[in-house]
Image (cartoon, helix red, strand yellow):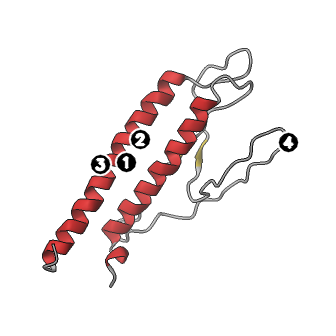
Amino acid sequence: MPINDLPTLSILRTKMQWHQERQRVLAENVSNANTPNFKPRDLVEPKFEPGSGKIDGAVATLPMTRTSASHLGTGDADPTFGQNRRTGFLTRPAGNSVNLEDEMLKTSANQMDYAAATSLYSKSLHLLKTAIGKG
């Protein structure tokens, strides 16, 4: 079995990919803080089946549509993770409901969680290398 197929490493890799994608979504929220009618988005955290190392169920995606040629493209978004549609923010008269303080708190928590997952991943690889005598 290749090292990359180990359930723990697979889960950590998926978690790191989720944090990367979430960082992109949170950055879009911050960059559109003054865009009229913009609603902030967030990603749903992936759930894992106990003991399998696999994501629990597939997430359906909804492609974004450009309604005007002057709108920016959506980029290369990873459709693996679902959108969290819960909004608890007040909407300003322009229709924008981005709360910069909350977005920055989410960004910093996301960065810390990504660093923790990265550290666990690298320590797991080092432990495996030590166990087989190559570290």
Cα–Cα gap, marks 1 and 2 = 6 Å
Image quadrant containing the N terminus: bottom left
Cα–Cα gap, marks 4 and 2 = 31 Å
Name the residue: 32% across, 74% down: 6
Residue 45 visible to the viewer: no
Q: Amino acid at mark 1?
A: Tyr
Q: Of helix, strand and loop, which one carries label 4?
A: loop
**Foreground pick, 41 / 112:** 112
Q: Of helix, strand and loop, which one carries label 3?
A: helix
Q: Amino acid at mark 2?
A: Asn
Circle 3 crowding by C-alpha within 10 Å: few under 14, some 14–19, many from 20:
few
Cα–Cα gap, marks 3 and 1 = 5 Å
The image position of residue 78, as x and y in percent, is: 59, 57
Q: Which residue is mark 1?
A: 114
Q: Are marks 1 and 2 in contact (CB under 8 Å)?
A: yes
Q: Which residue is mark 3?
A: 116
Indicate which disc, 3 or 2, sits on the residue closer to the N terminus.
2
Q: Amino acid at mark 4?
A: Thr
Q: Which residue is mark 4?
A: 67
Q: Are marks 3 and 1 in contact (CB under 8 Å)?
A: yes
Q: Quadrant of residue 68?
A: top right
Question: Can you say whether 49 is above or below 67 in the image?
Answer: below
Q: Are marks 3 and 2 in contact (CB under 8 Å)?
A: no
